[in-house]
Image (tube, grey):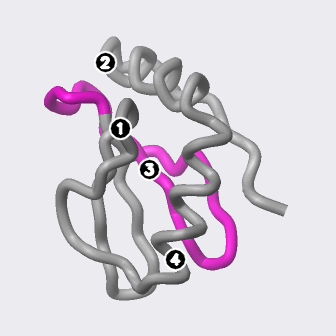
Amino acid sequence: MPTICAFYGILIRMYWNDHAPPHFHVNYGDFEAQYRIDTLELTVGKLPRRAHALVLEWAAMHRAELMEDWHLCETKQQPKQILPLD
């Protein structure tokens, strides 16, 4: 599972050939979560409130890039790195 971005201890990842709907995975310490790309809805797991807010802020800025990476992963290609939050 490639890590496409890392910031403030938050790791954003995607699986190759993962199931629909398009989504990304987040690891933060012992926490794991999954977010839909289209709605940014938290669908699986949980994160501390501050980490959740940072993920939403980051994902809102990079939704198009996340979809591009999703399409790359669907075809088992290496996803591109996405810039982290400053």
Question: What residue does disc 1 label?
Answer: 39
Question: What residue does disc 4 label?
Answer: 51
Determine the CA span between mark 2 and mark 4. 27 Å
Determine the CA span between mark 1 and mark 2. 19 Å
Decide which of tag 1 and tag 4 comes sooner along the chain.
1
Name which residue type carries label 4.
Ala
Which secondary structure, mark 3? strand
Determine the CA span between mark 3 and mark 1. 17 Å
Question: What residue does disc 3 label?
Answer: 13
* Callout in the foreground (3, 1): 1
Tell me where the magenta segment starts and ends, as one range. Answer: 1-22
* Callout in the foreground (1, 4): 1
Judge whether 32 appears above or below 41 on screen. below
Q: Is residue 21 magenta?
A: yes
Question: What residue does disc 2 label?
Answer: 74
Name which residue type carries label 2.
Glu
Decide which of tag 3 and tag 1 comes sooner along the chain.
3
Name which residue type carries label 3.
Arg
Q: Position of residue 12 (x, y in %)?
A: 50, 55
